[in-house]
Image: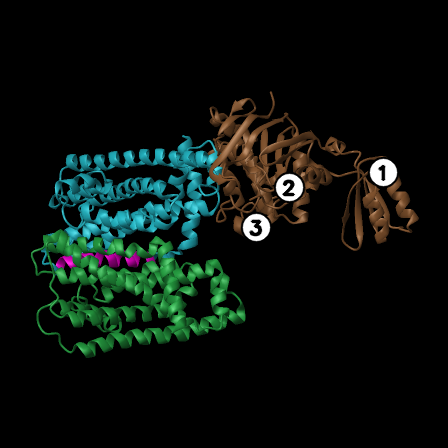
Chain colours: A green, B brown, C cyan
């Protein structure tokens, strides 16, 4: 627990000194503006819930990518990654702590997008299922953190993590049904979407903002959590392998 | 007309204060004259104001007051003329584009100084040849050794064939072989008839290269002398080195009127600083009488002058 | 003459950086794939919002052109790479104007961005029902390049402003391109916004060049197309002039303040 907290506070301190970490708080409302302006101009159904859910999930995802990519590469550049690897503490736990603090910032994005929809477009969204929404935000956040654990060893092995980081954005928003529900995608791609935790989180979050009773919320929350945990588990196995290989070959700084 | 001339040059950095809370002056009424064709050394500890002076002369820093001229052109009013007549070399590894080749680096800087076409290509080739980099000319700079990078720095500084060259701590971080090569290159530059202003805190480098040296500390000129004559400033202060001197003899030496200092060195050696030749004779007599056999005497080097004038802070950085 | 020479030699750096970051494969499957996904993302949203074919075409064209504008904003980040190589002080000592160095320094972005936009317009847009006639192709390519270059000039100005503020450079470039996506007629017509927003849109070259592209798509007469393109050129030139003075101001600030914190 102490390790977890250490990582948590370390990342918060990092976030304060590096404004880049807070950029999602600036970009999330801007995305809402884009989505809602498209919706406003269209003739179709009200997409307010979509326009609020999407930037929130995008923010979470961007933060996960940024921490998985930048934090590790920054550690590598500063030479502190070696220190972390050399330290006896299990690296995974420290890392998860760093992640969760960032996810907290992502939740701020939800509040912002909700406000923008109300203030700019007069679309004050009611929350008919606040408990489901709250649980969904938390669980999706945790799953994002877990999935970042899967990404981190991948980034560690790439010289230009930034490129990967950038590539993993919009294709995943599409695949994860972040804005457009997965049913709109071609049929052959839909099974793949169901493996991405974002698609479950997005659907549930949208349902929690809609009127009708939410179908099987607990089961769906569990799926999100399980997918996140699976990502984290696989990631940690990978990370240990990478670290082990690095210890043997000693090529950390060049990777 | 001198190559470089500064008169009552002052530069302060707002925000940098001394102990008593006054704004500290990086250069304080600094007067310097470097004649054409000479290799002039600026000698002083870190923080003495050497780099500030170099930056003012190459127009990347404005004087707070006073004037600085390069070949008669004011660095403030005629910056564009000054920029074309000087070459700059800063020590260290930064300042080159690592992903470009040596040749691309030189052509880039040549283009910035207005060279073009055949002239630009020829100039880059000549400099690569001259700095011994021809064989690696098309290799990326970040694959080169430190010494090679430093040679490329010098080639870069020479890309416009400038009459005045400013070298700020050029051998910083160089290994001895690279530093030796570098000194050979400076001698070549002198024989070209170029004026070289060189900052260093390395005595031997200044002694080996410079026609004249200016000793600098706390932003002020302490003395400007021909390199040989700086020694003459304290010429009478010969030194005696001795080993395994009995304690009572040391005590006697310390009490001797003409002895300025007795410093302990490594391996039970001592260095006795004297104020005149007569004291040397007297000290030697005492040492021989005490049975000391490992003895030597020498005239003071620049180092003694430097330590004597600037104090014993040596290379410590001033706060 | 000299500016072109400086730009050309400085561009060597841009291409070296490009080679270091991308291989052909990484560019194709990493960058291009991601950008096409983004265009698809916004276009599909339009479909969900209940747009007809015309509306879908509007979105796919707008977002295809937007990709090059987005990539050109990378100049804000790559300009600060000059600080990393430690060459700012040497640039300050050189007689050439710094703006030309920086113009060449990041020229990989408008080139790669034009490529992305062209692939999106001619490869992706037809999948959403947009058709092009052969005669439109060269004009469109020309207008995409124009969009990239004029937006790049705007980006250079922003880059000069934040050259000294490392921490916020990503935020500045992202905010800039998202605002462009909102106000420049990428997703909804500029006329939908209140007057003050339209004034902001007017000073951004993308608004005009994108209008020119939409006019070409609608088979408009050459006159209005040329007028819109001309306005894009005008605003691009003004931003380049602003960048010229902003880089000079940056160097002069460094000369006055001194210290390694500037250079």
Q: Is residue B154 left or right of residue A222?
A: right
Give me the residue at 23% from left, 67% from top: A176
Q: Chain of mark 1?
A: B
Point out residue B165 in the picture as x, y percentages from the top left corner: 59, 33
| Rendered position, A80 above or below B265 | below
* Type of secondary structure dominating the magenta stretch: helix
Q: Is residue C192 in the magenta section?
A: no
**Residue B303 in view here:** yes
Q: Which mark is residue C129?
A: none
Viewport quadrant of the C terminus of chain B: top right
Viewport quadrant of the N terminus of chain B: top right
The residue at the far top in this view is B1
Looking at the image, is mark 1 or mark 2 earlier in the sequence? 2
Q: Determine the secondary structure under disc 1.
A: helix
Front label number (1 vs 2): 1
Q: Residues within 10 Å of mark 1 (few under 14, many from 20)?
A: many
Q: Which residue is mark 3?
A: B144
| Rendered position, B7 above or below A50 | above
**Residue B125 in view here:** no
């Amino acid at each position: 627990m102490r390790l977890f907290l250490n990582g948590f506070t370390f990342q918060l301190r990092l976030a304060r000194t590096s404004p880049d970490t807070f950029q999602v708080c600036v970009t999330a409302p801007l995305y809402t503006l884009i989505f809602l302006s498209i919706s406003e101009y269209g003739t179709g159904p009200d997409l307010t819930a979509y326009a609020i859910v999407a930037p929130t999930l995008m923010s979470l995802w961007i933060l996960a990518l940024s921490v998985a990519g930048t934090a590790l590469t920054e550690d590598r550049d500063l030479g502190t990654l070696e220190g972390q690897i050399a330290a006896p503490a299990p690296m995974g736990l420290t890392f998860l702590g760093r992640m969760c603090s960032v996810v907290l910032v992502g939740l701020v994005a939800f509040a912002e997008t909700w406000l923008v929809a109300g203030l700019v477009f007069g679309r004050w969204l009611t929350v008919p299922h606040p408990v489901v929404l709250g649980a969904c935000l938390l669980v999706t956040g945790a799953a994002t953190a877990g999935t970042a654990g899967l990404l981190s060893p991948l980034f560690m092995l790439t010289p230009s993590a930034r490129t990967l980081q950038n590539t993993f954005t919009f294709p995943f928003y599409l695949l994860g049904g972040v804005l457009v529900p997965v049913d709109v995608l071609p049929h052959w791609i839909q099974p793949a979407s169901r493996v991405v935790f974002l698609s479950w989180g997005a659907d549930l979050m949208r349902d929690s903002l809609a009127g009708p009773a939410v179908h099987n919320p607990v089961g769906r929350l569990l799926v999100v959590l399980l997918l996140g945990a699976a990502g984290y588990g696989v990631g940690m196995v990978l990370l240990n392998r990478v670290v082990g290989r690095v210890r043997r070959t000693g090529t950390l700084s060049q990777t | 007309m001198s190559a470089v001339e500064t008169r009552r040059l002052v530069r302060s950095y707002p925000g940098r204060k001394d102990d008593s809370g006054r704004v500290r002056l990086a250069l304080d009424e600094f007067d310097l004259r470097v004649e054409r064709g000479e290799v002039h050394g600026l000698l002083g500890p870190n923080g003495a104001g050497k780099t500030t002076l170099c930056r003012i002369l190459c127009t990347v820093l404005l004087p707070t007051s006073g004037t600085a001229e390069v070949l008669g052109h004011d660095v403030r009013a005629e910056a564009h003329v000054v920029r074309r007549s000087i070459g700059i070399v800063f020590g260290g590894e930064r300042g080159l584009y690592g992903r470009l080749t040596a040749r691309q680096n030189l052509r880039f800087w040549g283009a910035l100084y207005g060279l073009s076409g055949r002239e630009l290509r020829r100039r880059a080739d000549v400099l690569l040849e001259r700095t011994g980099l021809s064989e690696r000319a098309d290799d990326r700079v970040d694959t080169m050794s430190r010494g090679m990078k430093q040679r490329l720095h010098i080639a870069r500084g020479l890309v416009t064939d400038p009459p005045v060259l400013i070298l700020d701590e050029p051998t910083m971080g160089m290994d001895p072989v690279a530093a030796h090569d570098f000194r050979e290159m400076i001698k070549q530059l002198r024989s070209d008839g170029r004026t070289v202003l060189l900052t260093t805190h390395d005595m031997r480098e200044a002694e080996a290269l410079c026609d004249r040296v200016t000793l600098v500390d706390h932003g002020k000129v302490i003395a400007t002398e021909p390199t040989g004559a700086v020694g003459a400033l304290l010429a009478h202060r010969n030194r005696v080195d001795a080993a395994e001197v009995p304690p009572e003899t040391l005590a006697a030496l310390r009490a001797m009127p003409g002895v300025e200092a007795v410093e302990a060195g490594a391996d039970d050696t001592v260095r006795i600083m004297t104020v005149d030749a007569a004291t040397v004779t007297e000290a030697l007599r005492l040492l021989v009488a005490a049975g000391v056999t490992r003895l030597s005497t020498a005239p003071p080097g620049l180092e003694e002058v430097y330590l004597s004038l600037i104090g014993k802070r040596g290379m410590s950085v001033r706060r | 003459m000299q500016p072109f020479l400086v730009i050309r030699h400085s561009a060597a750096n841009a291409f070296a950086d490009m080679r270091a970051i991308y291989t052909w494969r990484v560019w194709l499957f990493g960058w291009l794939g991601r950008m096409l996904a983004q265009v698809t993302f916004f276009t599909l949203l339009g479909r969900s919002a209940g747009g007809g074919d015309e509306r879908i075409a509007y979105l796919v064209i707008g977002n295809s052109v937007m990709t090059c504008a987005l990539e050109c904003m990378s100049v804000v980040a790559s300009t600060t790479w000059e600080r990393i190589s430690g060459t700012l002080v040497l640039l300050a000592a050189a007689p050439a104007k710094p703006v030309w160095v920086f113009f060449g320094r990041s020229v990989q972005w408008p080139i790669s961005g034009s490529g992305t936009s062209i692939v999106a317009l001619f490869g992706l847009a037809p999948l959403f029902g947009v058709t092009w006639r052969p005669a439109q192709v060269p004009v469109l390519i020309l207008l995409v390049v124009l969009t990239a270059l004029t937006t790049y000039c705007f980006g250079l100005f922003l880059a000069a402003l934040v050259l000294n503020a490392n921490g916020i450079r990503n935020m500045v470039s992202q905010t800039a391109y998202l605002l462009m996506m909102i106000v420049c007629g990428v997703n909804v017509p500029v006329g939908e916004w209140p007057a003050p927003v339209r004034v902001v849109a007017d000073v951004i070259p993308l608004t005009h060049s994108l209008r020119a592209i939409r006019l070409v798509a609608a088979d408009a007469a050459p006159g209005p197309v040329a007028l819109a393109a001309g306005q894009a050129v005008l605003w691009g030139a003004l931003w380049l002039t602003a960048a010229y003075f902003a880089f000079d101001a940056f160097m002069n600030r460094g000369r006055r303040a001194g210290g390694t914190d500037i250079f």
